[in-house]
Amino acid sequence: SVSLMAVRFAVFADSVSATILDPNFAFMALPNAHPDSFESTGPFSVSAATYWLAMTALLGAAISSTFIGGLSDKVGRKPCILLCLVVGAVGAICNYLARKSFWAFSGTNFAQGLFAATVPVSMAYVSDVRPKRKEKDAEIGILVALFMIGSAGGGVVAILMETQGLFAPLFVGAALNVFATLGVLFFCIEPNKMLFQGIRDTQVVDEEEEEELANQPTEINKRVMWNIIVGALFDNIGSAGILPIAMAPLALNEFYINFVAAGEEPIMSQSAFKWISVMVALTVVPGASFGQYVYDKVGQAAGCVIGNLVTAVIIVVLLYLAYIDPATNGTFGGFITAMYVGFPFTVLSRLSTGPMLDAIAPISQRGYVQGMNIAVMNFASAISPYLLGEMSDNIGIRETMWTCVVVSIVAAFVNLPLVYSPILGRPKKQVPKYARALRGEDGDIVYLALKGEWVPAKDLNQLNEERMAKGEPFLIVPFGTYEADKPRLNTFRRQARSDFLYIQNRTLEYLNDERYQEEENRRELIERFETSTTSREQVERIKADMGVWFTDYLEDNGYWVDDSPILYKQMIMQAFPPVNKGPDLTADNMMQFGVNYVRVMNKYLSDEELSGSAKAFAGSVVA
């Protein structure tokens, strides 16, 4: 877990370092807007220069992502992550040294971007150390979320350090990369090399993990891979309609520039523009949580299509709100609300791409497919804002936004065939371990127990003790209904008699076991028990079923359940005297609990059926 934390921090730090100047690009490209602004950005206009600066780093990252993932498949994940972090720190310093020239800065920014490829390698690392599909998908979602949060964090640093200069935040980015480098160097564990050959030690994997490894693809499905990649390309281009195009030029023009040009106080200040642009990225956190819920219900492919369509709808809403005339604080508030409420839903499509590619790739090519994923994301993020910015300058902002709407809808249609893929479609509902037979267990016994048939307590107890030894959950036998049990009530006494005798004798074995005279051994046994025991939610369900069974029995046998409650409560207490103070079993009360439990069992057995040791515990229950 420490190793994984180091990788997570590396993704966050590298994202901060790579995007820490993003909120300042618009003011770097606007001559005289700030003392640190470039003197000239020729031949670009302000909008084009703004997107050009962002494009240089992202284009470099897109190029490096195409090969660094595959490289990590061969030389290992850790060396590639370290290379990206070290060069990222050096690149930040080089960017600062080139701050006087627009073109020199563009060059160093591009060079730094060539090594800003921590994310695809980290995704491949997660695939190595999290073989279970659900855990892996959740962890990849965390990495993407950290990447986007890092982008927002970099922007926050830029805003807070505005008085120190537009380029001063680069030192914070460099420092973060240095700390991340040390974390990876000393705490990151390189996954076993056998992973790259598709080999694992089956003695250290559980049943679910072994099943998933057995179903791992042996080669990449190229048709599905390119379907995912092309869909991601359209998705990222369409998503640019929300961020950055909806903020700049749309919101910047309608709520700032138009007011300044008219000599009026703008509704949105420069500082507000920066904060809004930066903080919207943080909404990816609820988006990631909601996304995992959607993927569990309908699958990643369907979630991706939903995200594409929601993106199109949100762009239309933003376009409508921005062009309400006249612009007021109310329309501005509605615009920002729509962006912040809608953006978490739009990340459904972007968070799904990594897990989908991972699902179709063999172990030895995980780095390659994740590299392709991030390369496409970075390429689209680099090119689309620049091209859309040029389009908005030359054709119009409204037409540009509608283009993003159309592209998002096209992305939905491109991704639609993935919904019908057996790998990427709706996930099969996994039967929980407490409700099915595990590997090596007698399936007939489990089947009969879950069906409601009687299975001797000896067989069930042996099965659950084996589960406890392995750290697996106990098999939960449904309580059933009285209606189903009614025809078999006459056989219950005979069946229960053998169960009483077994439970009584097994409890005595624990009480007489010399090992459990030691507190430490009792504590270890309780810890294993708690690992396998029934969850609180399951207990509540069993309690409800038991209550219904009991009252149905009373009604069917002449008792009036609406009679005096005190009578029934006393009858229950008489039948079930206390065996423990509360439901918790501990090392301190375990032995007394066993004594009390045996005494209760004795009540339901004849004197002839009691063994000598059982008779020794005869008498009232000890509280």
Image (cartoon, helix red, strand yellow):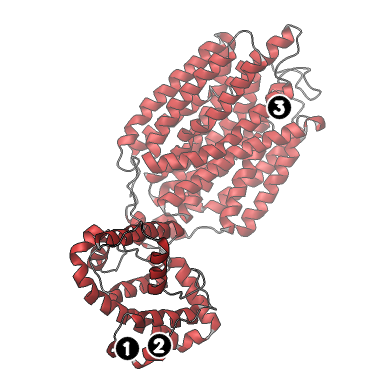
Q: Quadrant of the N terminus?
A: bottom right
Rounded to the nearest angstrom, the CA distance separating label 2 from label 3 is: 82 Å
**Real-space Cα separation, disc 3 to disc 1, in angstroms:** 85 Å
| Count of numbered circles on the image | 3
Q: Which residue is mark 3?
A: 24
Please state which of residues 16 and 619 is positioned toward the viewer in this rendering: 619
Dot 2: what SS? loop
Closer to the N terminus: mark 2 or mark 1? 1
Tell me, for residue 618, which label it has, or none: 2
Residue 601 is marked as none
In x, y percent, where is residue 157?
72, 36
Q: Which residue is mark 1?
A: 610
Q: Quadrant of residue 233?
A: top left
Along the viewing direction, whichever of 519 and 565 lies nearer the viewer? 565
Q: Amino acid at mark 1?
A: Leu
**Residue type indicated by callout 2:** Ala
The reply to whether residue 479 is in sight is: no
Q: Residue at x 35, y 44 (%)?
A: 427
